[in-house]
């Protein structure tokens, strides 16, 4: 502390975050901000500028808009969302509401550290026709996972699909 303030970390509402951003910019101090809303959900619509010294540590509620835009651009009617315990689904509620309003079919699947058992169970229990539909559906999936779980998940899906292809091909 003899060198002064090294960084500010805050978890506040939008008005306080704007004031802290202004202070951090004027003093050239990094500011790490975890966005919070009034109901303590970790996403909110704080309109902080993306210049200066403030870094928002959670995606804003615009995640729903971005996800809907991507799904609309790809013309997806059915898709999967894989999530893990590091992702807070409260921030996804607006997205799910809008997807339902548009008549889109969304399947949520929680992924934990035993990704391989989830996939092994699916690939061993489903008939071939359903497996083919599931493979097709995996092409329309969003991953809301920690980096470690995303890497493990993608590796396991790739491995499982390759093993499945080797078994079913003559």
Image (cartoon, rainbow, N blue to C red):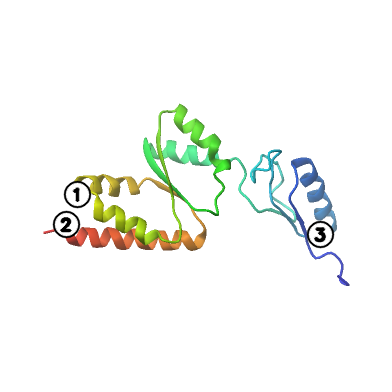
| Residue 125 shown left or right of residue 53 in the figure | left
Q: Answer above or below: position of 103 versus 67.
A: above
Q: Would you name the residue on which mark 2 appears?
A: 168
Task: Pick whichever, 114 or 22, lies toward us.
Answer: 114
**Image location of residue 59, percent across then percent down:** 61, 48
Q: Would you name the residue on which mark 1 appears?
A: 128
Element under label 3?
loop
Q: Earlier in the sequence, mark 3 or mark 2?
A: 3
| Residue 53 shown left or right of residue 162 in the figure | right
CA gap, disc 3 to disc 2? 61 Å
The structure residue drawn at horizontal position 45% and vertical position 61%, both measured from the top left corner, is 113
| Residue 84 shown left or right of residue 39 in the figure | left
Q: Nearer the viewer, mark 3 or mark 1?
A: 1
Numbered mark located on residue 28 in the image: 3
- Find out whether the residues at labels 1 and 2 contact each other: C-beta distance under 8 Å: yes
Element under label 2?
helix
Task: Pick whichever, 150 or 117, lies toward us.
Answer: 117
The structure residue drawn at horizontal position 44% and vertical position 28%, both measured from the top left corner, is 102
Quadrant of the frame with the N terminus: bottom right
Quadrant of the frame with the C terminus: bottom left
Element under label 1?
helix
**Image location of residue 41, percent across then percent down:** 65, 43
The structure residue drawn at horizontal position 52% and vertical position 58%, both measured from the top left corner, is 146
| Residue 121 shown left or right of residue 48 in the figure | left
As drawn, the residue found furthest toward the bottom would be 2
């Amino acid at each position: 502390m003899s060198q002064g303030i090294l960084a500010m970390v805050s978890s506040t509402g939008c008005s306080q975050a704007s004031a802290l951003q202004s202070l951090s910019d004027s003093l050239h101090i990094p500011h790490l901000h975890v966005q919070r809303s009034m109901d303590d959900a970790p996403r909110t619509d704080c309109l902080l500028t993306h210049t200066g010294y403030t870094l928002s540590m959670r995606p804003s509620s615009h995640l729903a808009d971005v996800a809907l835009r991507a799904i609309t651009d790809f013309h997806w009617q059915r898709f999967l969302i894989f999530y893990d315990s590091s992702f807070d689904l409260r921030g996804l509620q607006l997205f799910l509401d809008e997807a339902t309003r548009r008549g889109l079919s969304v399947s949520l699947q929680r992924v934990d550290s035993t990704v391989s058992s989830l996939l092994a169970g699916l690939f061993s229990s489903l008939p071939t026709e359903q497996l083919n539909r599931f493979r097709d559906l995996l092409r329309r999936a969003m991953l809301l996972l920690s980096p470690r779980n995303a890497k493990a998940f993608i590796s396991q899906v790739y491995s499982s699909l390759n093993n499945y292809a080797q078994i079913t091909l003559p």
